[in-house]
Amino acid sequence: MRVLVAPDCFTGTLTAAAAAAAIGEGWSRTDPTGTVDLAPLSDGGPGFVDVLRRAVAGQLVRAQVSGPIGQPVDAGLLLTADGTAYIEAAQACGLALLPVARSAAMQASTEGVGDLLRCALDHGALRVVVGVGGTASTDGGRGALERFGVGGWPAGVELTVATDVDNPLLGANGAAAVFGPQKGADRATVAVLAQRLADWAAATGGPADAPGAGAGGGLGYGLMLLGGRRVSGAQTVVEAVGLEQRAGGVDLLLTGEGAFDATSLRGKVPRAVAWVAQRTGRPCVVLAGRVLLGRREFAAAGIDAAYSIEETVGSVQAARDRPAEGLANLAERVARSWVPRR
């Protein structure tokens, strides 16, 4: 059987490349004569630059920027021969950059993204693509804009906002309400964050209702204030790695991420892979740390089945303790249901 393995990272445990390798290894135990094509992906969040480096020739430019709570952090942008600079916001203000067990929902800033924007322009970028997702911040992109400086975005340089979700800035589906709790905000803090975003939107008059404005804690909105055009981060990577062309030569697409939940269907990798599967007439299966969606929900998005490591090993903690082993074992088990019997 021919399978295309195209997962996102499993946040906090496995990179997209490591997840793809684990799935491929486990699948091959059941189907040793089959063909496995590994295509690690990103939705604009953690791993965006690393995944693109595997698919797009370019130079990695290193920079020291301001981290989510002001500490210096090392980050990198990918500069290609055609003048495109790819930036990953999570490298400057990602949740993984916070000190262990520290919540900084109120304090975390996107200042470092502004540093990376300036770095891209200083290196002569003609187009800047910012992967937006996985941030610790909920500042509406204010930190990035203030750090970037006055004068606005230069004419003649295209700014693309590659978001991992299509949420607006404000409201019940907005940045504070949906993603604040994931960043350690309790109910009272979410309310404060929501009001702060509303005040920021009122003061700046930007497109608060635009799809993707709420991505990255509202960083999407801030970049739109600079004139950025929003695209799907997952779709950007799917096109870069030629996923649709590769899918035409396989029998099944496998994708995955840490938590397969409602946000997965709002622009994340599983939804993009399902779109490719539908375009090419192939089935699509999700392997995740946790599955928090019902069959009816994911089937409506074009996903044929979803399996979780948690169900296999019995707990979330067990799944996190040995993630590669758990994912490989899950893939081995799932393959028994999908590989035709000889």
Image (tube, rainbow, N blue to C red):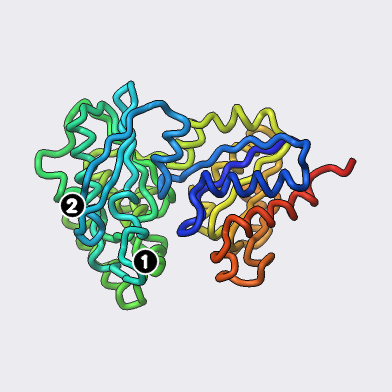
Say what amino acid the circle numbered 2 marks.
Answer: Thr
Badge 2 marks a residue whose secondary structure is helix
From the viewer's perspective, is 55 left or right of 108? Answer: right
- Is 205 placed above or below 86 here? below
Q: At 29% across and 54% down in the image, what residue appears?
A: 93
Screen quadrant of the N terminus: top right
Q: Position of residue 129 (x, y in %)?
A: 33, 36
From the viewer's perspective, is 156 left or right of 82? Answer: left
From the viewer's perspective, is 41 left or right of 111? Answer: right
Residue 169 can be seen, yes or no: no
CA neighbours of label 2 inside 10 A, class few (<14), some (14 to 19), many (20+): few
- Is 264 placed above or below 233 here? below
Q: At 29% across and 45% down in the image, what residue appears?
A: 75
Q: At 18% across and 28% down in the image, what residue appears?
A: 155
Q: Position of residue 233 (x, y in %)?
A: 43, 42
| Mark 2–mark 1 distance (CA, rounded to whole Å) | 25 Å
Q: Position of residue 307 (x, y in %)?
A: 67, 58
Number of dots carrying numbers: 2
86 or 217: nearer the eye? 86
Q: Position of residue 242 (x, y in %)?
A: 54, 29
Which residue does the numbered mark 1 point to in the structure image?
183
Which numbered circle lies on residue 204?
Answer: 2
209 or 115: nearer the eye? 115
Say what amino acid the circle numbered 1 marks.
Answer: Lys
Q: At 39% across and 55% down in the image, what residue appears?
A: 134
Which numbered circle lies on residue 116?
Answer: none
